[in-house]
Image (spheres, rainbow, N blue to C red):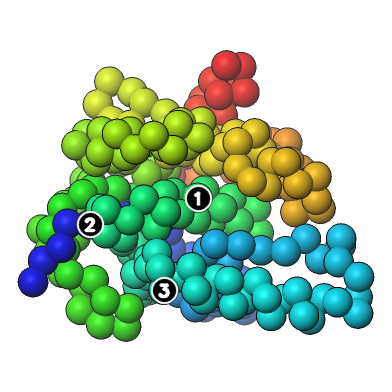
Amino acid sequence: MYKNKFIAFIDILGFGALVEKSGEVPELAESISEALLSMNPNLLQESMYGSINEEKIPKDQLEEVKATIAKMNENMSKMHPVAISYFSDSLVLSADIDNVIASQSILELLAKLSIKLWDEYSLLVRGGITLGKLVHKDNGPLFGPAMNRAYFLESKKAEAPRIIFDEHCINAFRKIKSFSIFESLIESDEKYSYISLPACFRYITTCSTLAYSKTKQLQAVEIAQSETLSKIQKIISADPPKRVKDKYVWLEAEMRRILDS
């Protein structure tokens, strides 16, 4: 019954505290709702394999182009399926080990989603990515040793706002020739290879398909990147609880290190 799959388990940091605070701040509840909707599997699937630069399309052709892209995404999703589930503040994505396009699309999606959640909602993510035995159906069962392991990596090992890889998982990715374009998305320390928000900015602005588009979407990412350090410093200066502050101190150091590299 099990299949060997790449799986990513992603969690929004500080979500519980935000929900508690939202009882007193109605605007915050609305932002939480919008952030969770941005993780909706249907929305993620719609933009998984392609999007359009609306500013370059004549208005009288826009609807036709949108329909074409939607059909392309639908066909690509059938050929290269990525199973997506989300519950509360958590997101799970998986793809068969032998489907290169689907498995690498997970990494691209994680980079875009990390930036979107930070830029629009000031939310950070943490996660674990592994490779192993899994059952995962859209709107259906989700279980297996790989699911347990991905959750363990996120909840017990990642610590900082980053998405860490099991060693055998990143090694499997690196055996794929086309993975080289994703190297700018990957950082490493003495224990793990991982994806961080600063690495997501680097990948999207230098190596992704968006990097060569010169669109307003790319400009928005570049602006978000330029504002990130000051945004982090503002949060740190507000003197949050130590366990929260430590995560932003780590993120600030990570951002400076990658900018200087």
Residue at image point 23% right, 71% down:
136
Q: Residue at x 41, y 73 (%)?
A: 78
Picture residue at 60% right of the left edge, 56% below the top: 116
Label 3 sits on what residue type? Lys
Element carrying mark 3: helix
Q: Residue at x 27, y 59 (%)?
A: 96
Label 1 vs label 3, nearer the camera: 3
The residue beneath circle 1 is: 108
Name the foreground residue: 176 vs 192: 176
Report crowding for label 2: few under 14, some 14 to 19, many 20 or more residues within 10 A (C-alpha).
many
Q: How many C-alpha atoms fall within 10 Å of the one at disc 1: few (<14), some, or many (≥20)?
A: some
Q: Report x, y in % for residue 205.
A: 66, 38
Q: Position of residue 101 (x, y in %)?
A: 42, 54
Label 1 sits on what residue type? Glu
Which disc number belongs to residue 5? 2
The foreground one among 216 and 21 is 216
Say if 113 sits above or below 206 in the image: below
Q: Say which amino acid is labelled 2.
A: Lys
Q: Earlier in the sequence, mark 3 or mark 2?
A: 2
Residue under label 3 = 78
Mark 1 and mark 3: Cα distance apart in space: 18 Å
Residue 228 position within the rendered picture, expressed as x and y whole percent measured from the top left: 66, 39
Closer to the N terminus: mark 2 or mark 1? Answer: 2
